Amino acid sequence: MKLCMIAYVGITEENGQYLVNDKIGRMVDDLAVHFDHVHFVGSATKKDDQTYYPNGQSILTYGFCANNISVTAVGISDGRTSPLQKLIIWLKRIPTYTKQIRQVNFVYIMMPGFSPFLAHLLCRRFGKPYSLYFGSDWQEVALFLSKWTGISRIFYGPYKWLSSWAEKTAVTHSQFTVVHGSQVLSKFKHLTVPVVETVPMVSIEPKHFYRREDTCQGKVINCLYVGILIPRKGIDYLLEALSLLVSKGYKINLQLVGSGDHDYQEQLHKLIQDRSIGEYVNFVGQIADLPTLLSYYRQADIFVLPSQGEGFPRVIYEAMSQGLPVITTSIGTIAHMLIHQEQALLVDPRSSLALCDGIERLIKESKLRRTLIRAGYQFANERLSQGTSSEQFLALMRKHYTMLDSQQ
C-alpha cells in the first residue's frame, strides 16, 4: 500500500538531500515502516531565503532515514507572496499533485490553505481516500498568510467566508480529520465524519522531563522565547515589554531562540537600538540539537510566547516539561486549552503593557509562579504520554479505512 503526504511545510536541500522539520520527519519515517512507499510533497525554499538559510546554512536538519520515502518539491508561498504569485504557484502544483495522488492508495493532507484544498479536490476527482491534519485555525492565521489580507481588511471578510467553506467541504469528504487544539475541534464537531484532536507532535519524551519547584531566584531574570521569528509571533511586543521592565529597574536577560523572516529581524534589531536594550537581548539563532535546546529551557526563569495567531504551539509543551512558568497570549486554542493563572498566565495579544505586567507578576508572586510550574508540568506530562502522531494516524486508518491491514 502506498501513501502520499502533502505538507504545507517548507523543505530545504543540502548536498543533494532534502531536509525537513524534525517532528514531521520522524512522523514520516515512522509511517514508512507500515507502507510499501511514502511520497512526501513539500514546499522547496530558495537558497537565498534568509528565513530558511540564515548565513547560508539550512535551519532544517532532518533527512529521511527510510529507503521507501521519495520527496517531491513544489514552489513555496508565504506571507510575502503576492496574490498573483500565489495563483501561479497554485496552478503549477496541479500536475505535481495529480501525478502523486494518482499513484497511491491513500493521501494525508496537511491544512490549512488553498493548496491543500486543491489536493483534496484532486483526491475526489480521482477517487482517492484521504485524511486531513489541521495544524492551526485557518481564519485565525488568515491575516498573516498573505500581504493583501493584512493590508486591506476589505478582503478579509470574503477570504474568511471562502476559507470556512473550503475547510468544511474538505473535512466533510475526508475519511477522518485530525486537528490541533480544541478550538479547531469545536468548528467541526457537528459534522458526521470522524474529527479528533491530535496528540502533540513534539520531540520531548518522558526521559527529557525536568522537574523543579521554583525559578526567578537569581539577581537577573532570564526570559526565554523559542520559535520562528516572524511578525505573527509578536516578538516586537515582547521587546517593548522588556524595555518597560528595564525602565522599572528590573535586571532582565531575554534569549530569542530561532530564526526567521530577514526583514522582520531587521525591524527587531532597529527596535532594540531605538529602545537602547541591546545589552539585555541575545539572538541565539536556530537550535537543532535537542539537548542544547533543553539546556536553554533549564537555564531560563520565565518562558514568554507573545503570539498573535496559533494552533497550540509545541514550545509550550517543551517549556512546561522543563519546569518553566509560561506567560502567553489568550488567543484561539491556547485560551481554550490552558487555564489562566493555573497552567499559564494568559495576557491580551498585541499589548506590550500586558506582557510587561504579566512578567512582573511572575517575578514578584512566588505562589503564582510555583502553581504554574506544577500545573504546567502535569499538563505537559499528561498530553505527551498519549503516544506519537504516527501511532494515532495508523490507529485512525485501521478504524476508518480498513484496507490498511488487508493490503499490508
Image (cartoon, grey):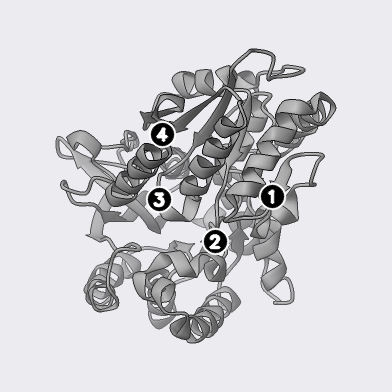
Residue tagged 4: 276
Labels 1 and 4: the sequence-earlier one: 4
Say if 245 sits above or below 131 in the image: above
Where does the N terminus fall, quadrant-wise? bottom left
Q: Which of marks 2 and 3 is nearer the N terminus?
A: 2
- In the picture of the structure, the residue carrying the numbered disc 1 is 347
* Structural distance between the alpha carbons of marks 4 and 2: 41 Å
Write the residue at 61% across / 43% down.
200
Depth check, mark 4 against mark 2: the one in front is 4
Q: Name the residue under label 2.
A: 134
Point out residue 297 in the picture as x, y percentages from the top left corner.
Answer: 56, 24
155 and 242: which is toward the camera: 242
Residue 345 image offset from top left, x and y in percent: 73, 42
Badge 1 or badge 3: first in the primary sequence? 3
Q: Nearer the viewer, mark 3 or mark 4?
A: 4
Q: Residue at x 43, y 48 (%)?
A: 35
Q: What element carries label 1?
A: strand
Q: Distance between the residues labelled 1 and 2?
A: 25 Å
